[in-house]
Every structure is written in structure tokens, then in C-alpha cells.
Amino acid sequence: MAPQYAPSLRSRLAPLLIILQAAFIIIYVFFDKVIIDKQKDKDTFSNFYAEFQDVNVIVIVGFGFLSTFLVRYGFSGSGFNLLVAVVATQWAVILKGFKSWYDGGEFTLSLRSLVDAEMCAASALISIGGVLGKTNAVQLVVISLLEVSGFVLNTWILETLVKVHSLTAIMMLHVFGAFFGLMLTWVLFRKGSEQQFEKETYDRKTGLFSMLGAVFLWMFWPSFNSVLVDSPKRKLEVVCGTYLALAASVVTAAAVSVLSSPKGKLNLIHIQSCILAGGVAVGVASSAVHQPWEAMTIGFTAAVVSTIGVQYIKNHMLLAFQCHDTSGVLSAHGFPGLLGWLAHLLLQIKDCEDHTIAIRFAVFHICTLLITITMSLSMGIITGVLSKWSFWRMPQDNKCFDDQAYWEFHHVSLHK
Amino acid sequence: MAPQYAPSLRSRLAPLLIILQAAFIIIYVFFDKVIIDKQKDKDTFSNFYAEFQDVNVIVIVGFGFLSTFLVRYGFSGSGFNLLVAVVATQWAVILKGFKSWYDGGEFTLSLRSLVDAEMCAASALISIGGVLGKTNAVQLVVISLLEVSGFVLNTWILETLVKVHSLTAIMMLHVFGAFFGLMLTWVLFRKGSEQQFEKETYDRKTGLFSMLGAVFLWMFWPSFNSVLVDSPKRKLEVVCGTYLALAASVVTAAAVSVLSSPKGKLNLIHIQSCILAGGVAVGVASSAVHQPWEAMTIGFTAAVVSTIGVQYIKNHMLLAFQCHDTSGVLSAHGFPGLLGWLAHLLLQIKDCEDHTIAIRFAVFHICTLLITITMSLSMGIITGVLSKWSFWRMPQDNKCFDDQAYWEFHHVSLHK
Amino acid sequence: MAPQYAPSLRSRLAPLLIILQAAFIIIYVFFDKVIIDKQKDKDTFSNFYAEFQDVNVIVIVGFGFLSTFLVRYGFSGSGFNLLVAVVATQWAVILKGFKSWYDGGEFTLSLRSLVDAEMCAASALISIGGVLGKTNAVQLVVISLLEVSGFVLNTWILETLVKVHSLTAIMMLHVFGAFFGLMLTWVLFRKGSEQQFEKETYDRKTGLFSMLGAVFLWMFWPSFNSVLVDSPKRKLEVVCGTYLALAASVVTAAAVSVLSSPKGKLNLIHIQSCILAGGVAVGVASSAVHQPWEAMTIGFTAAVVSTIGVQYIKNHMLLAFQCHDTSGVLSAHGFPGLLGWLAHLLLQIKDCEDHTIAIRFAVFHICTLLITITMSLSMGIITGVLSKWSFWRMPQDNKCFDDQAYWEFHHVSLHK
């Protein structure tokens, strides 16, 4: 008979977090003189700060509340998201600092490096969406450290070896995060947890909390795509394009959701991730999208692909490949990311007058994708195998999708 | 006996949305060269962007969560709001683009036209607040298209024929939206849905979701009123004036709510719309308000009028005129809008030294109101009659105010 | 036998609020010419406005939703917070206006004075966190007026007599608010309300609402600490430092919460205030913190102190001193504030080369603290005694922590 209580995290989580945080502090002590100011004038700071906050809202409120939909897992959904986000961001800031120290001899810290780091954290949050409810906080912290390291390594490879533009490289975060998460959930799959899938549902209130996260993601997604663009003219194009693509996604996701439902009803949780598909795809393709109709067509197609994915392919993945992708990250970020990559390729080729340049670009672009997918799949499998280690005290099957394993509740509130 | 299930929306909603979205895309394809950049320098973009996002938050989170208060209608409240907002915004952007193409030969798109369009969407969202819970998504999309067309037409008439300043014309959105919504709910009134008014209640949790929407509206209302003001000095005056008017409204609404309740208690849902009354009224009067005390007096009066309206007049409207105004848009936007209009008139006359100018202004100002009310009443009746058409599959009386007619629920969560 | 119903607020709250609001308006009428524009150029307005809105979000959404955690007190938690915030802000704006009129002959109003006033309101909101659920709206309004007056007086004494920098003086708001609230809850303590502490719990949904407030506070805390800093270079340092300190707090709070729980579980409500401890401490010490490791160490220590305080000291305060501190303001703001003060002292001394300057600074710094604590304790006791007056119709013991005493509910929703 399985033990009645979930294993206590005290002897694992507390030492891990304290050692980790102490290590982060010591690294900064070691790099005696951290240069904070990279921004030269007042304008740059002020203009950038509002967009930094938008990205912050996406990472903390957006992803955090999007994962509160599970009816008994809201505290973990939002709480662990915050924990993973700050661990991943701190780690990514340090990795970026190392890079700048290696390149120029100085360990720098700026608003831009914080934004960069939050984007790496976003890719980790996408990954852990796939294993939502099936892992404990210790595993999530370990996974996020490895994911961020893998993603930063991938960005570095793309920028250094393939000479990809840094914006294009960082926007592969959706594809990297989704495939990494998929591998994780495949490696960590356990037959026994299936009977617990009955807890994998939402009610009237958790659906609204999750909707709140979704609309915050939706509203600030234009900032997410445009924050790292330098030219103000391009920035405006990216903002308008992303807004229109997101709008097209909402309309299309509602239409396809009604079409594909047997009773002709909408599914709130499906729609929540599909309304973002256009933003994801346009973000990946952003450097090649110039006209509104291009952005809107991408948004339309991305929403169709994403809604069909979440409606049909998610179940197939579970039955055929034993990939149980709780938040549907493959459909929400994987497919739209691939579509954005394809759109980027097609638009770039369309604009080329010379065939040889077009072919050269295509080869280079395909390499980018192959490297990213290879990296994410292999890192995902390695991370999955590592985090399966019994040392981390994985929750028992019947404690999955349940806050009670990790959070204190008063007795009276248990009946609610 | 009425059918047990609500009519499926599949054959209506899906084609409507797909055709609509495809049409929007084709229009952009047709206008081959859409000029995105109207902003000249970097500063303009950066400064404007934060305010654009504030308006975005008002339209998506503010209006969306304000209408989640109905205990069984939260998914529809927030979900349909998002759908209507993006349809209305896209349509308004296109109408504005047509206008700029007609005026100058170019179809332009800029952050400013997005903000303009979101304001038109806000007027549509105000209107549908009146029929919240009594219409399906198909009807809402049709209503929003007609409402936005009517409102843009009204703005065009005011600007072209009466030579009203564009800011004053667009701020009539509250009056237009409220009276349009009132006519809608009058035409769509059905005796049978009355017994369902027992579902027209809130509980401890939906009250808080709705409160969340209300405070987001409250916080960013200064941006809503100031975003289209050009002069930075005036902008500051509008921001400070709106903030103080909103603050006065909160205090006054609480006082009047306690006074008018038989048990001396506060009503959360009533207060939620009344705390905004000051912002609405000051917005309409904004070009004539210069001193803090003027703004605060307007805020005070607006909250008194609005709270009394929601407490007493709402019921009278139902009994006497068969107008069942679910969200109380008449009190929340109609009366404060009229009050703002009156305050504008009085302040402008007070500032005039010459009698003839004062009379001329009064005539011109009264015309503005009469045109707006005539347009909104007539468009509201036409839209109501059109959306009553059985082709749209209006929900049966006993399916009103209930998410289950449109949204998928798991069985376990039905009992909650 | 105690009366069955809570005393009606009608004859107390309504006149108080109406007289107060009328007085606020009359003050502005009296100061005929209020100068709104203090900002000289467009840039200043635009840059400052986004940060003003961040502080607004902290005060309204952050503090408001943080205090919705009590299972039957959500409407009051968020509603009374809004009411107190606007009363306190309006009153603080007027006090600042008096000061500017006294200093320079002009009653000025600007975005900066609004931000200043919101910070005073924040100190009032911290104080009322200590008596959350045990006082009615009338008492809260009276308390907030006295608290703000006391805090503005304290700031004025510090700036004028001790020549403290205005930023350091205003950042004492955490210490002032916490000790003021502690005295309040001590004076207002009633034996009988203890049996009602069973209502002092949270459930799955109110925990999430409260989490929402907490993350909004967490995200915008860098703006709270940096908004009044003038130099853009320093601003960037404060933003980065606050962000890193907050991140360190999240990790540390989770670790200490798990360590100190008997079952090795996390406590969501404890964590919510402890993740902010780093931001509070760094804010108080901000003018002396230059390096990331300093900020992170402060964040780490503050979270340890705060988590231990909320876990152990809160109960001791209740048993030993009859201080029943509902929201744990002593641990959330008091201890981190003191720690920040200490860090400021140590860092400043470390940077001094000359012993006499170091000693002089220490004396001056200790005076600042002693004055603030003396002021807050004495004002807190006076306010407590005044607000204990039966005229204010304090809720009976068995009506504490319950919305039903103040808010209208429909019958059906009572069972929920």
C-alpha cells in the first residue's frame, strides 16, 4: 500500500534553495565590480522600463495565473511559477553576465539583460507547463536550471556558429521550450497517474483565474515581441503586427473551437492558449513580417493549427506516445512556433530576387531549426532522466494535481 | 415544451467568425500598401505606447472582468467581451483606415488609430453590458459591428457637420453606448426571461472577480481620458482632474449606497460602476475642466446621480418601460455622460465674456447631444430588431444568464 | 444577549464621507488658483506617468487584493482598501499642498505630489492591515486620516529638524505604518473576538485572489522604490537592486517556510508577505545600496527575518502582548523596515573613511529611527483610543471577519 501522505519536501527543497540563493549572491560578490549602467541617457531608461514591466507581467501574472486552471492545483500553479521564474531569471542573468565578462572583461547588468533573462525564464515556464501537476517544486527548480542553461547554450550556438540574428535566436524560445517540455513529460510519464486525470479539470472559478492570466498574456504580448527590437520604426511595425495577429487568433480560435466540439460549444481552457498562437507565430517570424495582412494571416493560421492541435493531437500524443502534456504546450507554443519559422522562411524567400540568396537563406534557416530541435529534444531527455531520480521525492501517483501535498490548509477549508 | 438544450452555435458562430476574419484580412491585402509609421520620432512611440497599453487593459481586463459578476455567467462575461472587443477594434481600425484613405489617399495604421479603435470598441462593450446574459455570441458580434459603424458615423457627422472637436466627439461614446444598449435591451425584452432573474445574482467569488475589473478600470481611467489629448500641459490637467474626480466618486458612491440601502449596507456591484461615474463625466467635460475643484464637484455629482440611478431608476425602467438593463449601463455611463455634457456647457458659458458667443456655443453643444442621442436611439432600435431575428438562435428564456449554453464543462464541476 | 444584527453604518458612514468629501472640495475652491503644472517639458510627464501608474497599481490592486485572503471578508478587504486609499491620498495631497503653499505661497498639484500622497496612503494601508476584519469602515476612515497626518508630520520633523533626505524620510513609511498598526491592534484588542478567529482562514479561491495582489505588489515594487529617485543612473541601480532583492526573497521565503513548517509544507499566506520583505528592506536602505550582492544579501536576510516573524513571533505577540496582527504587518513591513534601516547604517559606515563622520552619521541615523518609532507608537495609541469610542459603532465580536455586517448579499449566495 502506498504511503498516505506525500513525501515531505523539507529535506530537499530548503537546502536546495538556500544553497542556490547563496551561490547566486557569492557569484556577484566574486565579480567585485558589476557594471549596472549600460544605458546612456535618461530617455533610454524611461522608455525601456515600461516595456520591461510588461514582460515582467507576462512572466509572473500571465504564465502564473494561466496555470491555475486545475481545480485543486491553483496554489502550486501560481506559486511554483513564481519560484521557477525568479530562479530561472537569476540564473539567466548570471549566464548573460558571464558571457559579457567573457566577451568584454566586464560583468554587466542592465534592464536589457533582465529582459533577456526573463525571456529565458519564459522558455523554462513553457517547458514546465507540460509537466504541470506531476512534479514537485524541487524537480521544477532543477528542471528550470537545466532548461535555461540549455536554452542559453542554444542561443549561443545559433549566434556564434550559424550567425543568426540575436532576436531570431531568442524567439526560438517557444519551439525550444515546447519540445523540451514534451520530452520531459514523455520521460516522466507514469501509467499510475492516469487515474488521477479526473483531478485534471477546472471549475467556474479556476477557469476565470486562468482567463485572467490568459488576457494579461494576450494584452502584453506586443511588448514581448517588440521589446528587444531596436529601431523605433520596426518596433511600431512589430507592435501593430502582433496586435492584429492576436486579434485574428481570438476570432479564429473561437470559430474552430465551436466547429470541432461535438456539442458546438466553446472550451475556455483550449481557447486560452490558442488566442496566443498568433502572437507566438508572429514573434518567431517578426523580422520578416512587414504588412498587416501578413501578420493577420499568420495569426489566423496559427490559431487554426493550435486549436486543432489542442482538440485532437493532445489526446493522440497521450495514447500513442505516452506524452501527457498537461497545459498543451505543444499546441500552444510548439506548432505556432514552427509555423512562425515557416512563415519567416516563406516571406524571406518571397522578398529575395536572387535564387542563390534564397536557397542560401533557406539552408541557414533550416539549420537554425534543426539545431534548436536537436538541442531541446536531447536536453529535455537528459533533464527528464535526471529529474526522475528518486532522490527528488517525486509525488506519488495519487498526489498528483493536488495542492495538499505541498501547501498547508486549514481543516475547515478542506471541505470547500 | 421548450427544448432541453440550448441551440448549438456551431452552424452560426463558426461561419460568421471565419468569414468576418477572412474579410478583414482581404481588406488589408486589397489596400496593398498600408502605411504603418505615422509617428515621426522615437519619443512619440515610446511615450504613447504605455498609454495605449493602459487603454488596452481597460478594454480587455476592465470591461471583461467587470461583467463576470453573474454567478453562472463568468466565462461568457469575460470570454465574449474579449471576442467582441477584438471584432469591434478590428472593424473600427478598418473604418478609420477607409477614412484616412478617403481623406488623403493612404490607408494608414498607427498606434493612435489603434487607440481610437479601442475607444469605439469600448462604446460597443458598454452597449452589450445592457444585454449581458440574454444574447448569444453570434448576436453580440453582429451588434458590435453595427454599434461601431453607428458610432463612427456619429463621430464623422459631429466632426464634419457640426465641426465638433474630435476629442469631444469621441468622448460621446458613453452617451452613445448607453442609449444604444438601452434600446437594445428594450427591443430584446422577453417576459419569460424574468423568472430567470434569480440567476442574476453574485456570490463572494464572482463579486471579487468583478471588483478586479472595476479597479483596473478605475486605475487606468486617467489614461483613457488623457490618451488623445495632444498638449502635455493639458494632458497633466486631465490626468490630475480625472484622478481627483474618480477619488471623489469612490467616497460619494459609498456614502450614497449606504444612505439608500434599507439596512444601511453597501452593495458591491452597485458601487463598482458608480466609482467610475466621476471619470466618465470628467472625460466628457474634459476640454472645459481646468481647476481641481471643478473636476471633484463633477465627480461628486456624477457619483450621486449614478448611485441613485442604479438603486432606484434601474427597477423603474424594468417595470415601466420593460428595459432590463443587466449591468446598469444607463446609470454607469448614460447619466454621468449627460452630466459631463451639462458641466461642459456650464463651464464653457461661465468662461465666456460675450453673451452671443455663449449662446452660439450652447446651441452648437445642444446639437451635438441631440444628434448623438438620435443616432444612438435609432441605431439601437434597428440593431435590436435585426438581432431579434430567429436566424441567430437566441438562447431560450431558461438558458439566459448561464454559461452552460455556450461553454463545455466537465461533469464533476457542474455541482460546484 | 448581543444584538443579532451588526449595527447599521448609515448614520455614521454616510455623513462622515459626505462632509469629508465636501470639505476636500471646499479646500480646493478656497485655494483659488491651484497650480497644476510643475513639470516643465513633455518628457518629464511621459516618463513619470508610467511609474505613477505602477504605484497606483500597488496601492489599489496590490494592497487591495492582498487583503482578500480571509474567507468571508473579501468584499471588505478590497472595498474598504479602495475607500481608505482614496481618502488617505486626497488628504495627503491637501497636506502636501498646504506645505507647498506655506513654503512658496502657491498650492501646487503635480504627478509627483500624487505619487507622494499615494505613498502616504500606502503607510495607512499597512497600518489598517493589522486591524483587518476587526473594525468597520467608519473607524478605518478616521484611522487613515490620523495616520496620514501623523506620517506627514513625521516626515516634516525628519526633513526639517534632522535634515534627513526626503527619500529616506518617506521610506520610513514601512516602519511607521507597521508600529502604528501594532499599537492600534493592541488598543483595540478584545478578548471576545478570539473565538471568531476560526473565520480567520483562507480557502483555495481566496488564497488565489490574495496571491494576485501579492504578485502585483511584487512586480511593481521596483517602481515603488525608484519612482522618487531623480538621477536616471541611480534609478536604474535602484530598479535592478530591488528586482534582485525581491527575487532573493522569493527563494528564501520558500526555503524558510518549508523548514519552519512541522509537516514540511509551504504556507501561501505567509509567503505572500515574505516575498516582499526584500523590496521593503532595500527600499529603506536604497540610498546606500550600490552593488547587486548588497541588495541580494539584504533581500535574503529580510526574507529570513520576515518568514520567522510570521511563523513564530505573530503568535507570541498575541499571547504575550494581546496584539492580534491580522495581516502580520510587523513581520511584513516592520522587521524588514528595521533591517533596511540597519543595512543603510552599516553600508554607510563601511563607505566612510573618517571615523568622526561615521559616528556622526550613526547618531543622526539612530535619531531618525527613534523619532519615527516614537511618533508611530504615540500616534497609534492615540488613534486606537479615539477609534475605540462607541460612537463609531464597532462591530460586535461575532461579526468580526465577516462581510455580511457591511455588504448586501442575496439569499441564495449566503449558502456558498
Image (tube, coloured by chain):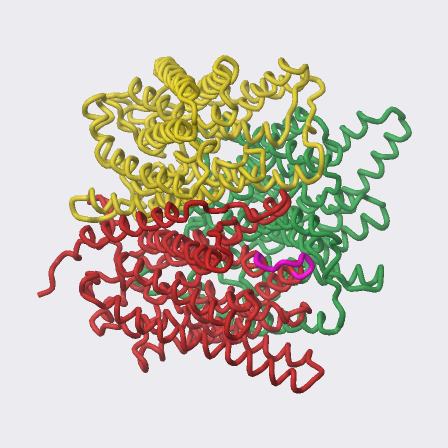
Chain colours: A red, B green, C yellow
Magenta run includes residue B158: no
- Number of dots carrying numbers: 0
Q: Quadrant of residue A3?
A: bottom left
Residue B382 visible in the displayed image: no
Give the left or right position of residue C64, taking residue C34 as reference.
left
The residue shown at (62%, 21%) is C25
Residue C122 position, x and y percent, is 46, 30
In front of the other: C148 or C415: C148
Residue C284 position, x and y percent, is 43, 30
Residue A284 visible in the displayed image: yes
The residue shown at (50%, 60%) is A103
In front of the other: B245 or A7: A7
Residue C38 position, x and y percent, is 68, 28
User: Magenta stretch?
Assistant: A227-234
Give the left or right position of residue A308, taking residue B283 as reference.
left
From the image, give the main secondary structure of the stretch colored magenta. loop
The relative height of residue A115 versus residue A356 in the rendered view (above or below) is above
The relative height of residue B17 versus residue A11 in the rendered view (above or below) is below
Taking the view exactly as shown, the residue that stands out farthest to the front is C354
The residue shown at (47%, 21%) is C148
* Picture quarter with the N terminus of chain A: bottom left
In front of the other: A328 or B144: A328
In front of the other: A115 or A400: A115
Residue B351 position, x and y percent, is 81, 26
The relative height of residue A144 versus residue C382 in the rendered view (above or below) is below
Q: Quadrant of residue A227?
A: bottom right
